[in-house]
Image: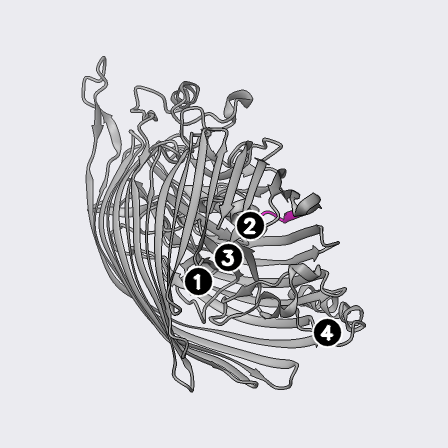
Amino acid sequence: MKVRLLASAAIAAIATYPAFAQEGAAAPASNATEADGGIQDIIITAQRRSENLQRAAIPVSAVAGDALTKQSITQATDLGKLVPSLQVTQGASNVQIYLRGVGTFGANAFAEQGVAFNLDGVYLSRPAAPAALFYDLERMEVLKGPQGTLYGRNATGGAINLVTAKPKIGETSGFVNAEYGNYNALKGSAAVNLAVGDIAAFRISGQYSKHDGYLSDGYDDEDTQAVRGQFRLDTGDGYNMNIMVDYGHVGGMGSGGTIMPLLGGKGWLGPSDPAVIAAYLATTPTAPVPQIMAKKDGYQNNDYVGVLGTFNADLGFAKLTVIPAWRKTNLNFRSYASSFLIDARENSHQLSLESRLANETDKLKWVLGAYYFDEGVSARQFYNQASNGTRINSELDTASYAVFGQATYSVTDSFRLTGGLRYTSDNKKQITEAHTLPFVGFVPPAFPNFTPIILDLRTDATSDVNFNKTTWKAGVEFDAGPRSLLYATVSTGFKSGILYSALGQNYSAPEELTAYTVGSKNRFLDNKVQFNVEAFYWKYKNQQISHLAPVQVASTPGGPIYGPVFKTENAGAATIYGLEAEAVWQMSRHDRLNVNVQYLRTKYDDLRYQAYSATGPAPVIGCAVTPTTLIGASADARIYNVDCTGRPMPQAPRWSFNAGYERNFELEGGHKIIFAADTRIESARFLSIDYLNLGRQGSYMMSNARLTYETPSGNFSLTAFINNIENEMVFSNSFQSPVKPGLIYNQIRPPRTYGVRGSVRF
């Protein structure tokens, strides 16, 4: 299958060459502009150097910052509608990113992303980190597949790079965007660029975004404020620097979940809605077994602050780049999105330093670098299901070192070879005090008061473990024509082991992924048509999955006692393959059509794990379940083996399709009316490893449209927009109650929203 898939992509790419070659010699694509009616180029830095997106021999998508504004994107969970291979969901205050099925379900202090998230080249480690950042951006880059050479840290499935708009030397300018919509949405962003002589500039930008909750009780709201300041100095003789300081605050009630199957079709019900609470209380086990009831007191009070510098120096033989960065994340939130109470305090700081030497000649492009990362996390987490609970107090430390290098050598003017290597060494430590709190009965006589007895089983977990790995990349690329590129790569990546609270074994092994890619990037018809295609085949080994699982919490003469903890374990090996194609047609100076489609097949070659039942009955899971003899934390508790081998991966729809059309109508005097519409179509996908129909999102179509008036100078525009025209209810995440088997809570993407947006540039 792998050989046929990759060969068919290569044949399809080569088949485009004759049609393109008929154009003869042409100007480089980088000379094209929107003014000549061609497709405008995007310059990216995904390979640690500036290059045309169409000349980068890697699977990468790029979205201009202006497109993020036009789509009203102010938070990471909105990114999925721009890139077909991407699924982004919310787990309490944590963001969960999946790329072609590879990602992390983790939603606690131990969790780390499987798709690296970077801000201006700096890796942000915390799952909550992609917040209060989506404003005044130059572009977003999505690298697909393991990035084990140039990015390294935990980039098993890929990387998302946010690139901020930098200060412009010699220019005083700025913009103000303001938006108002339903759900009392009020969003705004602004930036001011101030020149300081001929060699320096300041840029200050900010964001305000707020709307009422989409759910009936006020959950799924937004309340974000952020500010960013930058200073750039360029002496003009090869020395320049950029220093950035940013602060963000995320408030509001936070994310919510809705009970399934939506109480007879009544959707958008939040966790504390009376109808949801009634359905929850009616599900076995019922009172007098202790029950947890969601309230409207959920909140987020999260703060983010960072300092980042980029220093460049031309040393003659090479360019030196040094990027020191520091970031602090303080989380304080209460959530009921998963059917129970999560109350968390998490304070973390990270310090990183990356240094690179790079140079380019006609024959050789190379980069050598070293990387250091240090992180400390102090967390206080309480997970309360009334008849079962866990309280975890942790001190976590991570230190990571890496050296890396990559080079591209031109064998001929049109044929190049690429090789890269990285060695990474991670050390992780924990000191954790955990309390497992099972309900074991009532104080006698039970009737009439039914006073519950809650045990307190304490676990003191410590870890000091190292994870070392060498990852590599090899590739070839060939210029099949002036605007046609063929490439093939093999790359590897690994994600460091994850700690969890338990006696004895309390960390997972690293996960590894090897990716084979064949692709082609092409421009045709005098730069009016762009067609890119990529075939991929990934082998996933020791996949880390996060779920509520039994871990050893105590030792007794009768054997170890196991309690439920949100654990990350190695439970699967998978095969992933597919095809992604992108087409852009600049039909005229006024008309543009974009189409992007991905076909994705995923299969677990091995997926086995254990599930904990606090009440005894077998867990409700769409896989084979068999009992074990392990002893649970209460008399009723039972532990089961689960085998989901052969199932598809969660968050991996077989088909994803994006299409967009834009039409410019020119009026007298140079005024413009711009109409734009786009749609996303996805086939069905499971949302979790429970593989239940209630936790499955069916196929859907979600569309957006906007109409913009723009002045001749382009300095003022007014837009009316509508998102999710169909008002489609699309589930993004799913979680089964730990104490009520079969009770499912799903999270929902935004309903239909509409409003107006104004923009002023100066």
- Mark 3 or mark 2: which comes first in sequence? 2
- Mark 4 or mark 3: which comes first in sequence? 4
Q: Which mark is residue 139?
A: 3
- Mark 2 or mark 4: which comes first in sequence? 4
Task: Confirm or deny contact between disc 2 and disc 1 (CB under 8 A).
Answer: no
- Mark 1 or mark 4: which comes first in sequence? 4
User: On the picture, is 400 further left or further right than 591?
Assistant: left
Q: Which mark is residue 26?
A: 4
Residue under label 1, please give it.
Answer: 168
When asked about the image quadrant of residue 453, the answer is: top left
The residue range painted magenta reads 653-659
**Residue located 70% across and 69% down the image:** 10
Q: CA distance from mark 1 to mark 4?
A: 32 Å
Local crowd size for mark 1, using a 10 Å CA cut-off: few (<14), some (14–19), many (≥20): many
When asked about the image quadrant of residue 256, the answer is: top left
Mark 2 secondary-structure assignment: helix
Q: Residue furthest front?
A: 669
